[in-house]
């Protein structure tokens, strides 16, 4: 009986892997109801070493634009108009449908883009609910309600909504540790800080984060700066406490 050795099969295996890689392509099909976009060029850009690098581009013609190309790995990108960031997208195998309208940006059609925009929609709804509580307080004051009573009641509701949103964002990051969404949403969360710090929220997320998440270039850079800043603040506080005790 003749046996076929591994070396005989190896070229075919490599060819199969190459063909599979070549078949992985992204396709972005977008439409816009914004008249001022017609004739403008939209760019897909990704962050590399702190610089936004153009990956693809397309002119908007009669409200439509298309982009396509090979994708050897899943990447997080941003749709740009000139230097203005419009919306995030995930470049992955498959067709992404993008819809741009006044006050609305949507993307769907691939697993991670569906997941990303479900997250954005839910988070926006929670933010709007918090803002509505503030407007409700103003209306109730104008209607003659006691400001102390309504402030305490609505402040309690606002805290619950804030906790609900924080818990939702945290769980989304945890659920997506192993793909591009986890690090991206983590960095979005951290961008609200005045400067990188090891807050309780950050520590909580890092407590269960896998090595792949911590080694993401953006996350790793943030953690290094956050740890350094936290040590400086702790040292500053220690010096102040010593000075206060000496006085």
Image: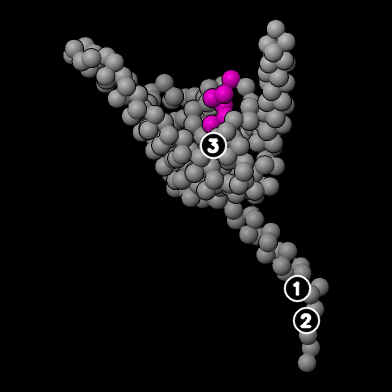
Q: Residue furthest top?
A: 247
Q: Write down the residue under mark 2.
A: 4
Q: Residue furthest left?
A: 143
What span is in magenta?
189-194
Residue 184 in view in this figure:
no
How far across and down, in percent of the image, does residue 113 sit?
Answer: 48, 44
Towards the viewer: 135 or 44: 135
- The answer for how far apart the CA atoms under marks 1 and 3 are is 43 Å
> What secondary structure is the stretch in magenta mostly built from?
loop
Towards the viewer: 137 or 60: 137
Callout 1 environment at 10 Å: few (<14), some (14 to 19), or many (20+)? few
Q: Residue at x 64, y 54 (%)?
A: 22
How far across and down, in percent of the image, does residue 98 sit?
Answer: 44, 38
How far across and down, in percent of the image, does residue 39 sit?
Answer: 47, 24
Q: Write down the residue under mark 1.
A: 9
Among the two numbered marks 2 and 3 on one chain, the one whose residue lies closer to the N terminus: 2
- The answer for how far apart the CA atoms under marks 2 and 3 are is 49 Å
How far across and down, in percent of the image, does residue 149 sit?
Answer: 26, 19
> Residue 147 lies in magenta, yes or no?
no
Question: Mark 2 falls on what kind of element?
Answer: loop
Among the two numbered marks 1 and 2 on one chain, the one whose residue lies closer to the N terminus: 2
- Check whether the beta carbons of the residues at disc 1 and disc 2 lie within 8 A of each other: yes
> Residue 193 lies in magenta, yes or no?
yes
Q: Write down the residue under mark 3.
A: 185
Question: Mark 1 falls on what kind of element?
Answer: helix
């Amino acid at each position: 009986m003749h046996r076929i050795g591994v070396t005989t099969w190896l070229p075919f295996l490599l060819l199969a892997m190459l063909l599979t890689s070549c078949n992985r392509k992204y396709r972005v099909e977008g439409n816009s109801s914004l008249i001022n976009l017609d004739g403008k060029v939209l760019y897909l850009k990704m962050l590399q070493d702190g610089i936004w690098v153009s990956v693809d581009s397309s002119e908007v013609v009669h409200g439509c634009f298309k982009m396509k190309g090979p994708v050897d790995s899943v990447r997080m990108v941003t749709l740009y108009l000139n230097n203005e960031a419009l919306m995030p997208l995930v470049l992955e195998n498959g067709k992404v449908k993008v819809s741009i309208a006044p006050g609305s940006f949507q993307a769907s059609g691939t697993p991670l883009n569906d997941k990303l925009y479900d997250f954005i929609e839910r988070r926006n709804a929670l933010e709007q609910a918090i803002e509505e509580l503030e407007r409700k307080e103003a209306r109730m004051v104008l209607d003659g309600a006691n400001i102390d009573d309504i402030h305490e009641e609505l402040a309690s509701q606002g805290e619950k909504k804030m906790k609900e949103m924080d818990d939702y964002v945290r769980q989304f990051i945890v659920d997506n540790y192993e793909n591009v969404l986890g690090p991206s949403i983590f960095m979005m969360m951290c961008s609200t800080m005045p400067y990188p710090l090891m807050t309780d929220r950050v520590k909580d997320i890092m407590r269960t984060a896998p090595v792949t998440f911590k080694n993401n270039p953006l996350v790793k850079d943030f953690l290094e700066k956050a740890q350094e800043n936290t040590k400086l603040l702790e040292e500053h506080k220690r010096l102040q406490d010593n000075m206060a005790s000496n006085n």
